[in-house]
Amino acid sequence: MGDSAGGNLAAVVAQETRPGRRSSADDVAPPVAQCLVYPSVDARFVTESFRVMGDRFFLTGEAMEAYRAHYLPDPASYGDVRASPILCDDLDGLAPAVIVTAGFDPLRDEGAGYAEALGDAGVPVEYRCYDDMVHGFFGMGVVPDCLALATEVCAAMGSLMRRVTVHGDG
């Protein structure tokens, strides 16, 4: 489970550790479920939500470009699936997922796109977009409704984990 850049890391861990695809992570068990909260899964910053929301709300495009410059100083790496897991051409066999986005977030479209790509690959996925929220709401427990929504997301992940571990299905 991870949010924002942590969602990127969680998606990459799920991809890198799945059976038959493990590289240097042979001693790491793949996750049984994944929860990506407004994940940053496309380092190219090419979505409509990035263009429209990138200068208006809590997380700005300028800030994202600065974060990316620290994490990925070489622009040639933006297309690497470890930087942009949405570009992975084989998502088969990934753990079932809960993917959450916020309506007023530059990352909204890439999170929705990744949820769609997982579903197209046959991965059980539950996608939720909280239309009236901004990036970061998951950790804003003092803001009205944020604690309730974060609790709802955690409950969805708990439910998914129980289904996967107890019943063996996604």
Image: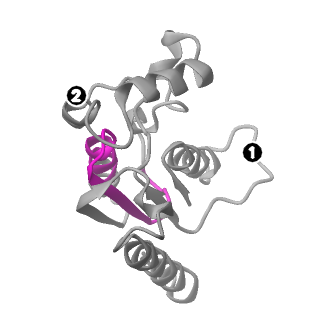
Mark 1 is surrounded, within 10 Å at the Cα level, by few (under 14), some (14 to 19) or many (20 or more) other residues, namely few
The residue labelled by disc 1 is 25
Task: Residue at 71% x, 60% y: name it.
Answer: 29
Magenta highlight range: 92-115
Q: Is residue 7 magenta?
A: no
- Taking depth in this image into account, of 96 and 132 the one nearest to the observer is 132
The one nearer the camera, 122 or 48, is 48
Give me the residue at 34% from left, 41% from top: 107
Is 56 on the left-hand or right-hand side of 2?
left
Residue 158 at x, y percent in the picture: 51, 81
Q: Quadrant of residue 138?
A: bottom left
Q: Foreground mark, 2 or 1?
A: 2
Say which label, 2 or 1, has the lower sequence index: 1
Q: Is residue 52 above or below residue 115?
A: above
Up the image or down, 56 lies above or below 74; here it is below
* Label 2 Cα neighbours within 10 Å, binned few <14 / some 14-19 / many ≥20: few
Percent x, y of residue 108 = 29, 46
Callout 1: SS: loop
Tell me which residue sits at (76%, 38%) in the image: 24
Q: Residue 129: x percent and y percent?
A: 26, 61
Image spot of residue 69 (x, y percent):
55, 18
Question: At label 1, which amino acid type do we have?
Answer: Ala
Three-letter code for the amino acid on which mark 2 is drawn: Arg
